[in-house]
Amino acid sequence: MRLIILGGPGAGKGTQGQRLCQALNIPCIATGQVFRTAIAEKTPLGCKAAPYVERGDLVPDELAIEFMRDRLTQADTSNGWLLDGYPRTAFQAEELNFLLEDLRQTLDWAIWLDAPVAMMMERSLARSRDDDAPEIVRRRLDLFHQRTIPIVEFYEMRDRLLRIDASLDADTVHADVLAQVNATQNG
Ligand code: ADP
């Protein structure tokens, strides 16, 4: 199974992504997490990503795309994966299509965790990570609307979108996602 999970900051991508990967036994590739770890460890990727992540901006597309090209050619991804945080721009979505063509893989579903803005704001502020300060969260929410919502439309037009009500509790959201993924797989 090859899945991407879309949603704004605080929509529950991290929580739902991890639970889904466990349930389906596929690796979870969370770019935000990858960048944060790389920054903490001061790796070359981390040094390049740091100034962007710290102010709530997206890292340049080239950097994100290069990372993903590397990551999806590693052995553990040959039987499936879930991407959390990628693609985040229309350009990344198109590049992912090209990459999958090269790798002769197909995306099963883009799962959109749809939650009201006020709820995403509240949940993000409750986490208190370095990049979860109010003005930075606001920046990330703006970027989500400007840059990531067009990707939702990109997958919707290709009949690859599953829309999930992410305002419900985590267990219900998880059950809904699994039910939709399984229903579409069997049908
Ligand atoms: P969020 O809670 O906003 O969904 P993430 O943990 O997914 O945050 O990402 C944290 C940060 O990492 C983003 O604010 C951005 O700077 C960077 N980032 C993650 N994925 C990407 C990507 N695909 N393209 C560009 N920047 C990214």
Image (cartoon, helix red, strand yellow):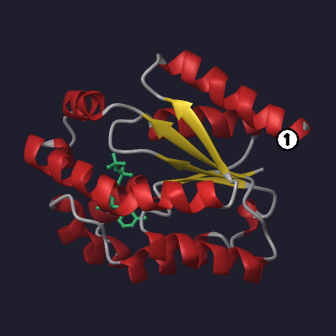
Location of the C terminus by quadrant is: top right
Residue drawn at 60 percent across, 25 percent down = 174
Relative to 78, residue 44 above or below: below
Q: Ligand 1 shows up in which quadrant of the image?
A: bottom left
Q: Is residue 108 left or right of 155 when viewed as pictured?
A: right
Residue drawn at 57 percent across, 38 percent down = 163
Residue farthest along the left direction in this orientation? 135
Residue farthest along the right direction in this orientation? 186
Which residue, given by chain and number where applicable, does mark 1 sit on?
Answer: 185
Residue type at tag 1: Gln
Relative to 55, residue 93 above or below: below
Residue drawn at 32 percent across, 54 percent down = 144
- Residue 19 sits in quarter: top right
Residue farthest along the front direction in this orientation? 157
- Residue 103 sits in quarter: bottom right
Residue 42 point in image, percent of width and height: 28, 69
Q: Is residue 163 left or right of 130 when viewed as pictured?
A: right
The residue nearer to you, when weighing 83 against 142, is: 142
Q: Is mark 1 within 8 Å of ligand 1?
A: no
Residue 33 point in image, percent of width and height: 41, 52
